[in-house]
Amino acid sequence: MRVAFQGEIGAFSEEAVWALYGEVEVAPSPSMEAVFEAVEAGRVERGVVPIENSLFGSVHVNYDLLRAHAVQIVGELKLRIRHHLMAVPGATLGGVRRVHSHPQALGQCQTFLRRQLPHAEAVPAYDTAGAAKMVAAGGATDVAAIAPERAALEYGLDVLAADIESHHQNYTRFLALARDGGPLILAEAGTPLKTSIVFALRENVPGALFKSLAVFALRDLDLFKVESRPLVGSPDNYLFYLDFEGSIADEPVQRALDHLGEITAEMKVLGSYPQGRTVG
Amino acid sequence: MRVAFQGEIGAFSEEAVWALYGEVEVAPSPSMEAVFEAVEAGRVERGVVPIENSLFGSVHVNYDLLRAHAVQIVGELKLRIRHHLMAVPGATLGGVRRVHSHPQALGQCQTFLRRQLPHAEAVPAYDTAGAAKMVAAGGATDVAAIAPERAALEYGLDVLAADIESHHQNYTRFLALARDGGPLILAEAGTPLKTSIVFALRENVPGALFKSLAVFALRDLDLFKVESRPLVGSPDNYLFYLDFEGSIADEPVQRALDHLGEITAEMKVLGSYPQGRTVG
């Protein structure tokens, strides 16, 4: 099996691939769009992309790509974002003079850097795994990177300090994608399933959002996620993201979606898949 | 009037301050938390913070700060995120060899950079306005920054190319904050108002989310934003963000919130304020 993700080897998305699929062949990709295209074209069996983060919210660009591409969600995973300080073997924490990482990671480790390395220079980089790769290639013992643990393993770096992020409640939810129309992905018996949909309401239907949620409440289907997103250029219209209990193979779900179709201008079922675990 | 924002002079948040309040004294702050603290302590009259972006979603950290601090929302604004390439006077587009900016801005201008400056090196920086400041201080004509227009004015740079972002539907919504318990902010007569609340549902109330939206639907109060956010560490519990029509001074809104109180474990009214305009 070949699985695409966006970023460099050692990125958090690659951690998500391994947590979902174990030892598979990974295909690092330059952009999210490239991941969707590789899945759609059948060049890879799966793609893994971030869809929401507990600090930074939903990744709307990936919702847009889900709407535009013939792919389906077949799995999910929540990964705790843990940052580690790493450097070449022989380096010591006290000897670090420069720290490279993505500005978001540097920001999330500000307290650690201020206390432990007050004289080190923080240098912005494109991404965390890329910073680790560069530190390894450079070979200097006074330069470190902030990156995921996997990057240390990949590039032969030593972890000088682990879990240095200020906010430990930082989780990213990843989706696993497969080509649309492929074989139905079967979950192990007993695994609870969920379904994700995106829809836009028909104009001039008063209380339409309320009615759209009523189709699920009437059938006792629990909602896991509800999110509205204004359509830019059309401020009175919204897209809605909904995750709810059950699979599109279930009759109550089919009836709820039929019912929903009466008040929506657009609807896409993004996939039915096993409810994912939390890792890290 | 003194208004705090997070970032350097010339940042998008400062653009939002000027669009909201015109010529006021600005207080650049090192973090979002510092903005909230300055407002709460009365060191500034207003704070302006981003709350959601059309590509990247809600800024949950600012929702957390809204819950934790004694501040209220008194205004909002949607700002189009426009990126400009800028350099010292005398520089030309053809002569640019290095481009500094935040990785997100570099990514959003990738198509422009590939086509117009295929041989220039893209160098990550902490923030867009900081990159402009550095380019101005350096003085070299072969170095440019990608930053907001305001940064060019502030640091005396020439804009070599305007609106170079690939995605023109990139808007950030900013909130204006005032100290809680201050005088009620009155909108001009006829300005439509909206109210923002955050709440958590009581456990074991079946269909509680549906019921919580019913209290607004029953009173024909339109919803502008609905968003659920799982509480980390307590996966069956959610926080909900709701923006709806009207002000807490209106009787139907008061009755709706009374009604909502029956099924919520926690609720905070974040503020009632004039519905904001879109700028850019």
Image (cartoon, coloured by chain):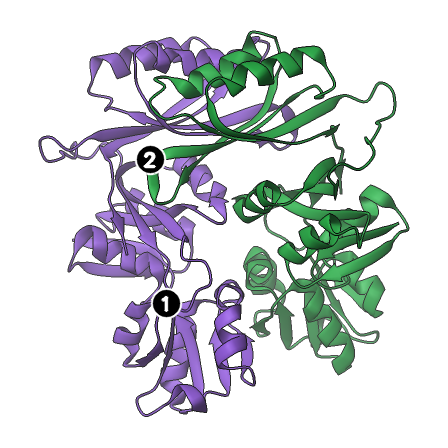
Chain colours: A green, B purple
In the rendered image, the vertical position of residue A109 relative to residue A217, given as above or below: below
Task: Name which residue type carries label 2.
Answer: Ala
x, y percent for residue A165: 63, 53
Q: Position of residue A62 (x, y in %)?
A: 59, 46
Residue at 41% across / 53% down in the picture? B170
Q: Can you identify the residue that label 2 sits on?
A: B70
Distance of label 1 from label 2 (alpha carbons): 38 Å
Question: Looking at the picture, which amino acid does disc 1 mark?
Answer: Asp
Left or right of B218 in this view: B250 = left
SS class of the residue under badge 2? loop
Residue B111 vs B90, above or below: the answer is above
Left or right placement of residue A35 versus residue B221 in this view:
right
Q: Residue A163 appears at what percent x and percent y? A: 70, 53
For label 1, the crowd category at 10 Å Cα-Cα, with few meaning under 14, some 14 to 19 and many 20 or more, is: some
Mark identifier at residue A32? none
* Secondary structure at numbered mark 1: loop
Q: How many marks?
A: 2
- Report which quarter residue A193 is drawn in: top right
Which residue is tagged 1?
A: B163
Q: In this view, does B254 lie above or below B37?
A: above
Specify whether A269 is left or right of B34: right
State the residue at coordinates (71%, 43%).
A79
Chain of the residue under label 2: B
> x, y percentage for residue A99?
63, 71
Q: Is residue B246 above or below residue A162?
A: above
**Does the CB distance between marks 1 and 2 fall below 8 Å?**
no
- Give me the chain letter of mark 1: B
- Could one spot residue A163 in this view of the protein? no
Q: Are marks 1 and 2 on the same chain?
A: yes
> Between B8 and B240, which is closer to the camera in this rendering?
B240
Q: Residue at x 59, y 9 (%)?
A: B204
